[in-house]
Image (cartoon, helix red, strand yellow):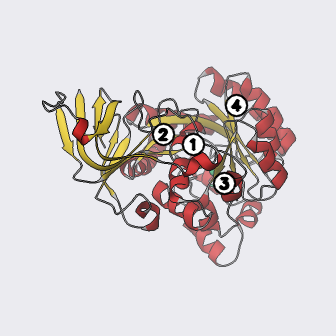
Amino acid sequence: MRLIVVNIGTLVCDRRGRMRLAGWEMSQLDIIENAYLLVEDGTVAVFGKMDELPGDGVGADETVDARGGTVLPSWCDPHTHIVYAGSREGEFVDKIRGLSYAEIARRGGGILNSADLLHTLSEDELYRQSMPRVREIMAKGTGCVEIKSGYGLNTADELKMLHVIRRIKESVPMHVSATFLGAHAVGRNFSKEQYVELLVNEMIPEVGRERLAEFIDVFCDEGFFTPDDTERILEAGAKWGMRPKIHADELAASGGVEVAVRHRALSVDHLERITDAEIELLRTSATIPTGLPGTSFFLNMPYAPLRKMIDAGCAVAVASDYNPGSTPSGDMKFAVSLACIKMRLLPAEAINAATINAACAMGQSGDYGSIAPGKRANFYITKPLPSVDFIPYAYTTPIISRAYIGGRKV
Ligand code: NIG
Ligand code: FE
């Protein structure tokens, strides 16, 4: 099956085969004006200038006219909790009335509320509730996503979540990576020590045996798990080949960055309270610092200093953090706008953070995150735009006229 997109006003592509972009490189976008893009069997075959197209065509089965629109690589979202039960707008109102996220958690709300609700649902019902969110993000241009467990907080319910993630993976064209986040909070009726034992001795081996998760995550933060707990949990996950992706420095400088770097985590995420020493540590590591601007927006918290990290030479990513408590949105275009408006990233930096570097934060930049020969044909076509900078600037304007995943229209 050969699909050709013609009359592309601006094609945002990658002719250098980069796996991630660091520091100043993040401000560069590889652009071809007046371009075509040829897709073969779901993979990017070739692209170039319209006037380089052979006169007799390329024998495509389907031709799409972009009518001067821009073509960009699909968003990659390397941090979501999109599988959850119900919603938590009650806490939203509590926060408006003055309670903080940490206070709600201390009172036994927050993540534990979602766990109580999830406990009452069957696997089928949880899948049914999660799928509209999955479809929504695909329609909004996401083509590769990471989904975490972490609202089960006991063995059966964590497995239920991971089974739902596996069903999503099998039922959508988008790439889905699964992360085991049993260490999201201490489950009800356990002491912290008991719960860490349960994670290490029961949950992780079960998840490992069923091969339900590629990655392992820990909420390493004040009031949740310490760096020592994190270390133990990551070591247990490593025995089953699960690579770390860590939540750190959201509520306080937690020590999570150091643990993440030492354990060669793919990413360390949140970082609203990161220190300069931790930025220095990340600069020379392979771990991708991942900012979640939607979380700071929704919780009225400080934003992670991604500007400072890029200036220091880091390769940073941006993710949505789609979840019911701190970010009930998986809109990556809005996350990119916030990265520009609130974190002072240039549009090109924010787009690279949400595509190629985001793919790298999932270990997927060989196949996703840019339009390059041999990669999956995940892209979207916009209406004609005045420039690429218009995308984050017009922060609520829908821009997508057609989204494609694996060369097929979503
Ligand atoms: O990444 N910070 C920890 N976990 C989620 C929030 C989960 C929730 O409140 O339900 C986050 O923001
Ligand atoms: Fe999160």
The quadrant holding residue 153 is top right
Q: Which residue is mark 4?
A: 203
Quarter where residue 194 is shown: top right
Marks 2 and 4, how far apart in space? 32 Å
* SS under mark 2: loop
The location of residue 121, given as percent across then percent down, is: 52, 46
Q: Mark 1 near mark 2, Cβ–Cβ under 8 Å?
A: yes
Label 1: how many Cα within 10 Å (few below 14, some 14–19, many 20+): many
Residue under the point 82% across and 42% down: 258
What amino acid is at disc 3?
Ile
Residue type at the position of mark 2: Gly
Q: CA distance from mark 1 to mark 3?
A: 28 Å
Element class at badge 1: helix
Who comes first in sequence, dot 1 or dot 4?
4
Quickly name the residue at label 2: 369
Q: Amino acid at mark 4?
A: Met
Q: Is residue 148 above or below residue 307?
A: above
Q: Is residue 117 above or below residue 407?
A: below
The quadrant of the rendering that contains the N terminus is top left
The spot of residue 374 in percent (x, y) is 40, 27
Disc with the residue nearer the chain's start (1 vs 3):
3
* Residue at the bottom extreme of this rendering: 97
Label 3's element?
helix
User: In the displayed structure, does residue 158 sit left or right of residue 254?
Assistant: left
Whole-angstrom CA distance, mark 2 to mark 3, is: 31 Å
What residue lies at 83% left-to-right and 39% top-to-bottom? Answer: 229
